[in-house]
Image (tube, helix red, strand yellow):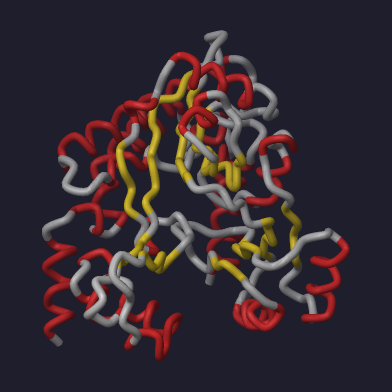
Amino acid sequence: MASFGRRFIVKLFHWEYWPFGIIQLPLIFMWLWYSLRERSFFYFSASNPGIISGGMMGESKFDVLLLVPDEVKPKTILAKKSFTVTQLLKLIEESELQFPLIFKPDLGERGWMVRRINSEAEAAQYLSEIKIDFIVQELVDLPLEFGVYYVRFPNEAKGRVNSITAKEFLAVKGDGTKTMRELIMANDRALLQLEVLEVKYGSRMNEILPQGKEEILVSIGNHCLGTKFLNANHLITPTLSESFDRISKKINGFYFGRFDLRCATVADLENGNVKIVELNGCGAEPSHIYHPDASLVKGVRDLITHWQNLYRVSRENHQLGVAYLSFQEGRSIYKKFKALKD
């Protein structure tokens, strides 16, 4: 009960944990205003003509990743929810993939059902739980993970990076005396994941970690799974923007969105020597705003700028002949998306 009270306090006084809708509430009025100006509730669909709805809703993550050049993405395949375990394992073998792998829903958001799968047994368990088609992806074993936001206005020759988020995986460090449970209970960010970690580690929760030994609790770079998002905008350089402009121009119909990627060094990031594990369209946020103890006012201000940029990209593409989704088309996509998620 005491841990419940402490978790409530942690969430209350750290806005990075507040419900998504609260942070986005002021932006609803911007969306309504822009919708009135463009006479379309789905004006944002023109932001990325190569992605369904511009990447706001209903897009297949697998189809979007197919647009990314092969040299900067890991091997990825699509598995059907109707597969038997035998069919799934055969597909993995034929694709020359090996465990551990990353499994994630083809339609999903905010870390839902994203897992590292280490064995055939875990693959079978995942298949028994997932209700939609899912992605099987080669594990990219590189030490650094970033979210890089890119924007290119259609009437300008070059795009640029305007947000970088460094991701620090959830971990605890042993002191030779405390159990894993005690270390987790003493860590606010880990405490919020207590139930998940209890299932994952079972009896190991009572294990005493040696002095200085670090245990990475979650190796999936998602904020909802405990990853710390750090503002890394200081890494933005002209060379970095040029690197991602070069990559982005190879992606048909892409102007505005976030690359979630891994790389070996910051120098590799700057030069575009990366592995893009996911490409998100206009529905993705510039996640540097969730830096611990960052200003809420500054975060909302950055989101306002973000939506202003989204509107400009969408409008310029529309002026160049890209149609907005009709109300009927947008409603149909939304209903299909919600039905698959539910």
Seen as rendered, the residue at the extreme bottom is 203
What residue is at 29 percent from the left and 46 percent from the top?
24
Q: Looking at the picture, how far across and down is residue 122, in whole percent?
A: 63, 79
Q: Residue 294 sits in which quadrant?
A: top left
Looking at the picture, does residue 201 appear above or below residue 74? below
In terms of depth relative to the viewer, which is nearer, 300 or 250?
250
The number of numbered discs placed on residues in the rendered structure image is: 0
What residue is at 67 percent from the left and 64 percent from the top?
134
In terms of depth relative to the viewer, which is nearer, 244 or 272?
272
Quadrant where the N terminus is found in the figure: bottom left
What residue is at 49 percent from the left and 20 percent from the top?
241
Drawn side of residue 185 relative to residue 248, left or right: left
Looking at the picture, does residue 9 appear above or below residue 95? below
Q: Looking at the picture, how far across and down is residue 56, in whole percent?
A: 51, 44
Q: Residue 105 sits in which quadrant?
A: bottom right
Looking at the picture, does residue 1 appear above or below residue 112? below
In terms of depth relative to the viewer, which is nearer, 265 or 253?
265
Q: Looking at the picture, how far across and down is residue 106, in whole percent?
A: 64, 59
Looking at the picture, does residue 136 appear above or below residue 183? above
